[in-house]
Image (cartoon, rainbow, N blue to C red):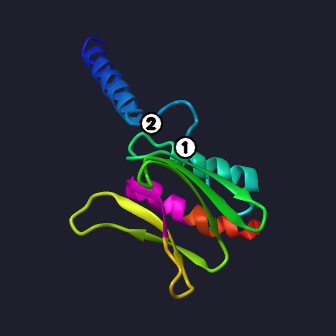
């Protein structure tokens, strides 16, 4: 029995360390995004707003879908200070950009119409959040 006790204590300590390490970086608040086809418009916009509130961002953004398939973007400090923009979604395509040597991404809505401006909707986002936002921007068109 005495030989098993140190082993049992070591195994319990290793299990505790492993389980506590798995929670590092993850909150227990259920703020993980679950993106899927079939999401409602409200769930889609909530996911976009959750990404837009990310503490890693240079500027926070809020999103709303207006009549006529206009995406309203409120971004504090992102567009030369506090700003709001309404972007007509038809005729745009979501794209990721990463500056050379950069570690973060921007997400843009690029216009398919020559001469029309492109719109940055998110800056300084990590890859995971940027790709999720790109997916959401592509997905939100289904409500138009």
State the residue lying farthest toward the bottom: 114
Q: Image point 40% across, 54% down: which residue?
A: 125
- Pointer 1 local density, CA inside 10 Å: few below 14, some 14–19, many at least 20: few
The residue wearing badge 2 is 26
Residue at horizontal 41%, vertical 53%?
Answer: 80
Residue numbers of the magenta segment: 119-134
Q: Is residue 120 magenta?
A: yes
Residue located at (74% from left, 50% from top)? 42
Count of numbered circles on the image: 2
Tell me if label 1 and label 2 are in contact, CB under 8 Å: yes
User: Residue 117 vs residue 70: left or right?
Assistant: left
SS for tag 1?
Answer: loop
**How much space separates mark 1 and mark 2, taking CA atoms?**
9 Å
The residue lying toward the viewer, choosing from 46 and 21, is 46
Q: Quadrant where the N terminus lies?
A: top left
Q: Can you give x and y, in whole percent of width and height, for residue 119 in the image?
A: 50, 67
If you read the primary sequence from the N terminus, does the residue marked by circle 1 or circle 2 appear first?
2
Name the residue nearer the viewer: 89 or 98: 89
Q: Is residue 71 above or below residue 114?
A: above
Q: Which mark is residue 32?
A: 1
Apparent side of residue 95 relative to residue 44 in the rendered image (left or right): left
Q: Position of residue 6 (x, y in %)?
A: 25, 16
What residue is at 59 percent from the left and 65 percent from the top? 137
């Amino acid at each position: 029995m005495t030989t098993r006790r140190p082993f049992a204590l070591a195994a319990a300590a290793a299990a505790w360390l492993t389980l506590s390490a798995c929670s590092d970086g993850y909150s227990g608040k259920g703020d993980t995004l679950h993106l899927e086809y079939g999401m409602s418009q409200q769930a889609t916009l909530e996911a976009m707003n959750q990404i837009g509130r990310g503490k890693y961002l240079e500027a926070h953004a809020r999103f709303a879908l207006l009549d006529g398939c206009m995406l309203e973007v409120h971004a504090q400090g992102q567009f030369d200070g506090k700003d709001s923009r309404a972007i007509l979604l038809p005729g745009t395509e979501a794209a990721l950009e990463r500056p050379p040597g950069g570690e973060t991404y921007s997400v843009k809505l690029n216009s398919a119409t020559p001469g029309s401006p492109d719109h940055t909707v998110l800056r300084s986002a990590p890859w995971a959040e940027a790709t999720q936002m790109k997916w959401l921007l592509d997905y939100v068109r289904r409500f138009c």
